[in-house]
Image (spheres, rainbow, N blue to C red):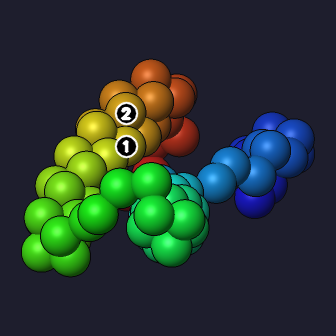
Amino acid sequence: MAEPDGSVRPATARVGTVVWGLIVMALAALIIIAQLGIVTLNGTYVLIGLMIGAGVALVLGGLLSARKRDNEPTTGKS
């Protein structure tokens, strides 16, 4: 995205994309662990834990993103 002074801002990863990637990796790791027989998993508890973790990550990521955005100089346009 081009800035008003002509410079280009570096692209950043979106919070939702990172959180969904972490959820998929966590599920894959849990499936591998369960298939190896290391632990026995209860699907309901796994889903509850993943949903709580994803919710916390999305809220914290949104707050950090908003905080970062508030520090940028404004151009006077709405």
The residue indicated by pointer 2 is 64
- Tell me if residue 8 comes above or below residue 69 in the rendering: below
Tell me the quadrant of the picture where the N terminus can be found: bottom right
The amino acid type of the residue labelled 1 equals: Gly
Q: Is residue 4 left or right of residue 45?
A: right
Closer to the camera, 56 or 76? Answer: 56
Task: Name the one closer to the observer, 54 or 5.
Answer: 54
Q: Which amino acid does label 2 sit on?
A: Leu
Against 27, is 11 above or below?
above
Q: In which quarter of the image is the C terminus?
A: bottom left
Q: Mark 1 points at which residue?
A: 61
Name the foreground residue: 60 vs 23.
Answer: 23
Q: Quick one: label 2, few (<14), some, or many (20+) residues within 10 Å?
A: few
Which residue is most to the front?
37
Residue depicted at 37% across the width and 33% down the height: 64
Give the structural element (helix, strand or loop) at label 1. helix
Q: Distance between the residues labelled 2 and 1?
A: 5 Å
Q: In the structure shown, which secondary structural element does the residue marked by tag 2 occupy?
A: helix
Q: Is residue 29 left or right of residue 7?
A: left
Residue at x-position 64% and y-position 54%: 13
Q: Quadrant of residue 40?
A: bottom left
Residue 65 is left or right of residue 50, and the answer is: right
